[in-house]
Image: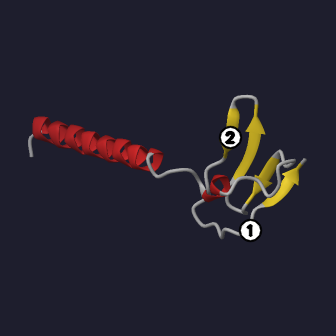
Amino acid sequence: MPPRDEALAVTLSIAVALLMVILAVIAGANAGPPPATQGGPPDPACLEWTDSCVVCSRTPGGLACSTPGIACSRGAPRCLRR
């Protein structure tokens, strides 16, 4: 394969990989809220809670939640801070 063809193949491979990453981010953004946010905190006085996968807290800007780890086992929501 001439060097020019190799450069084109590498460029196309990078473009395809970038497109796949963009599509994955878009799909994740439209997946909805993490389960820890669906039911809300265990009680109204709770400022920070977790379901063992996601940690959510109330902030001045609204609700803020972490992203779940790759291998997490969800549990019942429990309050971490009041």
Measured from the top left, where is residue 64 in percent x and y? 68, 40
Residue 66 is left or right of residue 32, and the answer is: right
Q: Which residue position is annotated with label 2?
A: 64
In the displayed structure, would residue 43 be above or below residue 16?
below
Measured from the top left, where is residue 13 in percent x and y? 24, 45
Measured from the top left, where is residue 76 in percent x and y? 74, 68
Query: In this view of the protein, which residue sits in the foreground, 46 or 73?
Result: 46
Q: Earlier in the sequence, mark 1 or mark 2?
A: 2
Occupied quadrant, residue 26: top left
- Check the image and tell me how it is coloured: secondary structure
Q: Residue at x 78, y 53 (%)?
A: 49
Residue furthest to the top in view is 60
Q: Residue at x 28, y 41 (%)?
A: 14
Label 1 with label 2: CB-CB less than 8 Å? no
Q: Residue at x 17, y 43 (%)?
A: 9
Occupied quadrant, residue 42: bottom right
Measured from the top left, where is residue 5 in percent x and y? 11, 40
In the displayed structure, would residue 16 be above or below residue 72?
above
Q: Which residue position is annotated with label 1?
A: 76
Q: For marks 1 and 2, give the CA distance.
A: 18 Å
